[in-house]
Image (spheres, rainbow, N blue to C red):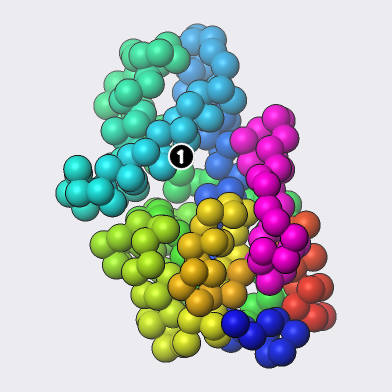
Amino acid sequence: MPSVADSEPKALAFDVFGTVVDWHAGVTQEAALLAARHHIEGDWPAFANDWRSGYAPAMARVRSGELPWTHIDALHRMNLEQIIDTHGLGQLDEAERRQLNLAWHRLPLWPDTMAGLQRLKSRFTLTTLSNGNFSLLTELAKHNGLPWDCVISAELFGHYKPDPETYLGCAKLLDLAPQDLMLVACHPSDLRAARACGLRTAYVRRPFEHGLVTIEPAIESGEFDLLAENFEHLADLLRVP
């Protein structure tokens, strides 16, 4: 595969949850606000991590065929119902449960996200490549004013990452060869799957994705094309003014 030094990618595709937005802070805050209305005390950072922990297993059930195609909003709601009583939120009514489930449409950005994306947009086509459903990604972009050139969701392919159909499908929709597309993500497993499909890869550190407990995934030296501290650093590495 050509290195970034040989020629630049033509487009950057971004993982969203954890890479672009701080899901942990957003879910924690919305759960705490709802709980306060009912005078419910709880560990809302733990609730956020507990809810997120069901994300990959739920998608695996779809990928294996155990569940029919089910988009992320529905999987999030299914996972919410499995933990809501455990965290003392069982008294929430249907409207409140729906409001909480849609917290994933209103997640806040990391501090470097907007400035980094605006710099990168001056040279590259920018898109999402997320397992989030199309409506979720669209509303999340609207909520935060994200400068995407387009929104690409795994829902468009009927496959979840890390299925090859997602990475290759993204390149095809953009009319690009896989090597002309770079995936930007904070999850090494996502990047490895993209690399296996011929995409270029940029790893962005997000050590606080799961809150105050720092998590640094293990990666090998030279495993990805670029290693960036944040989106501003990624723009520097790609020589964007």
Whole-percent x, y for residue 111 in the image = 73, 52
Q: Residue shown at 58%/48% (left/top)?
A: 18
The 10 Å Cα crowd at callout 1, few under 14, some 14 to 19, many 20 or more, is many
Q: Amino acid at mark 1?
A: Ala
Asked if the stretch drawn in magenta spans residue 223, the answer is: yes
Where is residue 210 drawn, in percent x and y? 62, 35
Q: Which residues are magenta?
A: 202-228
Identified at 81% across, 73% down, the residue is 236
Residue 214 lies, with reference to residue 109, above or below; the image says above
Residue shown at the point (35%, 57%) measured from the top left: 160
State the quadrant of the C terminus: bottom right
Which percent across, then down, holds residue 2?
64, 85
Residue 176 shown left or right of residue 64 in the figure = right
Q: Secondary structure at mark 1?
A: helix
Residue 113 horizontal/vertical position (percent): 68, 59
Secondary structure character of the magenta stretch overall: loop
* Rendered-image quadrant of the N terminus: bottom right
Magenta-colored stretch includes residue 5:
no
Residue 115 visible within the image? no
Residue drawn at (54%, 10%) of the image: 41
- As rendered, which of 231 and 226 lies closer to the eye? 226
Which residue occupies the foreground of this view, 188 or 144? Answer: 188
Work out whether residue 91 can be spotted: yes
Q: Which residue is mark 1?
A: 103
- Tally of numbered discs: 1
Above or below: residue 157 compared with residue 178 = above
